[in-house]
Structures are given as C-alpha cells and as structure tokens.
Amino acid sequence: MYHKILDQFPPGFLWGAASAAYQIEGAAQEDGKGPSVWDVFSKIEGNTFMATNGDVAVDHYHRFKEDIALMKEMGLKTYRFSIARSRIFPQGEGEINWQGFMFYDQLIDELLKNGIEPMVTLYHWDLPLALEEKYGGWLSRKTADAFVEYARVVMTRYRHKVKYWITFNEQNVFMQLGYRLAAHPPGKRSFKEMIEANHIVNIANARTVRLAHQIDPSYKIGPSFGYGPSYPFSCDPDNVLAAMNADAFNNDWWMDVYARGHYPKVLLYQLEKAGLAPTILEEDRELLANAHPDFLGMNYYHGGTVQVNRFEQKRKSESKQFDKTDPYQMSTANADDLEAKLFETAKNPYLKTTQWGWEIDPVGFRIALRKMYDRYELPIIVTENGLGAYDTLEKGKVHDTYRIEYLQSHLIEMKKAITDGVDVIGYCAWSFTDLLSWLNGYKKRYGFVYIDRDDESERTLERIKKDSFEWYKTVIAENGRNL
Ligand code: BG6
C-alpha cells in the first residue's frame, strides 16, 4: 500500500517511554523489599554478563524526581513503568509492606503533577522469590492466586490515578527463556513445564483483566507482548507454510488466548498429539473466553525468517543460531523439539543487524502492526521499541545519530500503518534512561538519557541528555507531523 500523504497522528496520541523496576530502581533491599527471583539469578556466575545485577541499577528509586523532571522537559505524555511486586508483598503474598507502596505513591503523584499519564506494568519478570520457593513459581495455580491478589491491592489503591494497566510483560519471553531455554529464572529446560506454567500465567492474566473491569469499568488493561512477524525465506510454498507455523508457534499461541479467548486450534492439536498440551480445566475455558483486554501492547524489536526444516537436506541458508541475547523468534536446533517439525530459522539477507546481532527491520514493524490489528481488531499501544547500542560520552555529549535514525525509521512505518488503518493509540520508546539489560549489563544502552555508570562501576550515576532526547522532544511537540 503506497500513500502519497500520510495521516497525522491522532490528537492525544500517547507519546511515551518505558522502563521496568528491576532494570532501573536499585534499592534492592530497602524499605522492606523482599527478594525477587532476579535478585538471586543474576548473581549466579555465568547467568548474566559480568554478573551485572539490579542492586543499584540506575538508582531511580532515589532519583525519580530528577528523572521525572527530565520527562517533563521532554514533553512525555505517558511513562510506562513496572511495580516490583516484592516491594508490596515481600513474601509474595500475605502481609502488605506499606512502605513499598510509598515509593509508587510518590512516583505516581509526581508523574500526575507533571502532566504525565502513568502506565503501570503489573509484572515485568521479577517474581517474588518466596513464591518460587514455596510453590515452584508459575507451575502452581497458587502463584496465580497470589498475583491476582497483588493486582487487586494495587489496582484498588490507584483508582482515580492510573488508567492504563499492563498485566504481563512479554509472557512469551519469560516463559521461553525461563522454563525452556534456561536463560532466565527459574532456569529450566522443559517444554512441557513451559506449556503448563504458561497456561497458569494465562489464567492469572484473564482473571486480572476481568478484575480490573470490576474495580473500575473505565480502566484500560491489556498485556504487552514481544511480537515479531515471521517471513518465509522464499516463495517456495513449503517455506510459506513454515512461516505460518512459526507465527502460530511464536505469536498466536499467546495472542490468540489474550484476544480470542482460546488457543490456536492447529497448534493445540499438534501439542495434544505430542503429549505436550496444557492441562485445561473446564472452568479455564469459560474464564479465558470471557476476559476481554481493552488494547494489545506490542513490544517490537524484530521478527524472523524461516524455512521448512528438511532435516535430511543440507540447509539452504546459514541457519541463525539461538543466541541468548536475542529473545525473539526463538527456536532450537534440536530435531526432537516440536518446532523443528514446524520450521527452522534462517538468516534474512536483506536486513542489517544491531551491535548485538538483532535484525533492524522498520518495515517489519508496519507488518507487525497490520497483522496484529487485522487478526484481533483491538487498539494497539506500542509498549516498547528501541535500539540497544554502545554509546560514547564525548565532552559531556552523546551523539547517538544511529538511535535517532532507528527510531525515526520505525516511527515513519508506524505512521504508515496508521495511514493503512491500524488503530495505534500510543508509542513508548524503550527506554527513557539507560538501564540494566537483563543479560547484557549496562553497556547495551537504550535510553534518551545517558547514565554515567558501566558494568564495572556505579560511577556518578549522573543523568546526561543524549542528542536523541532533543530529537524525541521535537517529535512529541509536533505530534509526529514532520517525521
Ligand atoms: C524486552 C524487555 O524483551 O526487551 C525489556 O521487555 C528489555 O525489559 C528489552 O530490556 C531489551 O532487551 P535487552 O536484552 O537488550 O535488554
């Protein structure tokens, strides 16, 4: 679809930026906070780059006012952040730690005072450790009960203050990396356990969506999903079918449950035959079918290219190795794995990559928006999109032209998708300040604001505006008119 003139962004478009508690807050043991699974996992040698962790992170816990002043200067309309559950429930359930709430009370009030709409993620991967130890984490329905209770307490407290809620961040990523590929906590390698744990998260998600609407019918709630479209390596019909399989395996398996209320039938049938289907109770079906999100959150970094897996033949293209730094379009080389029968990943010769090997594919963003909207017909909030790069501070400045180019090219494609007819209501760049990359430490920077720290030292933690800060400020002020 070619457009001579692009539509304008709608008035009130939510220009924003995003973060997650563990990646920015620090204060890991302050004011009664309990440990999360990440507090432990990140400190085990070999789990993260140079054992980097969030003990101090970028010290947002103590510097949030300074950070919000910068957001205000930039003109942000919304700020997406997550609540560290173990600040509220140090033991995962039971007694509430009111001191933990005080931080978020102040944060939210400060945002509102500065005219910035808070967008709250209830779960960005930092499960309270106590729930992992007591119940085996997401493998138990008791963990879903504890989540719903936490969500109830938080969503009740912030009535009249918060309108936008995100249930789970990238369920596909924390499930695959946590339960199957052992790169995130709880560090398991079991496809079956992933499917079971994932079903329990689906239950928690659906219950929370319904609860939100009971607490306040004006609440807007949805999940944030790590979405990437699958391309066939060629027009060989077998490769086209492989791309359909990959979409079902990487996207529809989650998105259909959120938005259609049931698992995609073909893939479910394959899992049943392989003895890998989730244990679905009768009441689960009713629940999933009757939880309706108000929007879908899309985290877009890139998609992937696939081809049919002809096990016996020499591969047609250099196969993309699974690299634990790239959580999207996951597959393994193991021929016994279910997806090996469905597709194998391939390198896309048309796309350049970032310094961490992630494909840079702005057109894929438009494709992703089109596909998600066509299939589910719900408004979309882009809850993450950004470039991880090594930045250099020279004479007090960071000239991150490459980040501006990256973001600009993605925003243009998003504008085209809006012109195509997709209902996009907000865009949160990842991230506002530099922050901890879960597995890659502090040198993989995403922010508009440089933080003076690295993997070895916390240094001054000073905040320094990058060139991209001024650029995004202008984009917001012009409501994206001159992209
Ligand atoms: C998303 C997560 O997967 O990608 C973020 O929601 C994360 O929390 C971002 O930081 C970038 O990933 P990475 O591995 O480059 O930090």
Image (tube, rainbow, N blue to C red):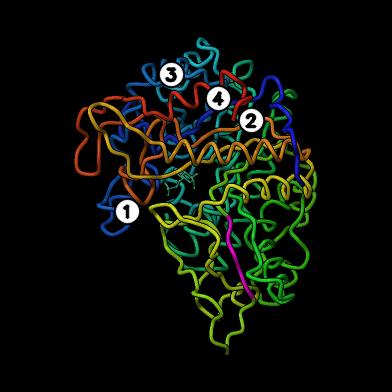
Q: Nearer the viewer, residue 327 or 125?
A: 327
Q: Nearer the viewer, residue 482 or 167?
A: 482
Indicate the amino acid at tag 4: Val
Chain-order first, disc 3 or disc 2 = 3
What numbered label is drawn on residue 48?
A: 1
> Do tag 2 and tag 4 residues touch (Cβ < 8 Å)?
no
Q: Which residue is mark 4?
A: 475
Q: Which residue is mark 2?
A: 426
Query: Which residue: 60% across, 42% down?
Result: 224
Asked whether residue 306 is drawn in magenta, I would say yes
- Estimate the x, y position of residue 252 in percent, counting from the top left: 70, 57
Where does the magenta region start and end?
303-307
Indicate the amino acid at tag 2: Gly
Q: Secondary structure at mark 3?
A: helix
Q: Is mark 4 within 8 Å of ligand 1?
A: no
Query: Which residue: 42% across, 63% down?
Result: 323
- Estimate the x, y position of residue 396 in percent, counting from the top left: 25, 26
- Categorize mark 1 by other alpha carbons within 10 Å: few (<14), some (14-19), many (20+): many
Q: Find the distance from the CA under tag 3 to the CA under tag 4.
A: 19 Å
Q: Find the distance from the CA under tag 2 to the CA under tag 1.
A: 32 Å
Query: Which residue: 43% across, 26% down?
Result: 469
Q: Secondary structure at mark 2?
A: strand
Asked whether residue 214 is drawn in magenta, I would say no
Indicate the amino acid at tag 1: Thr
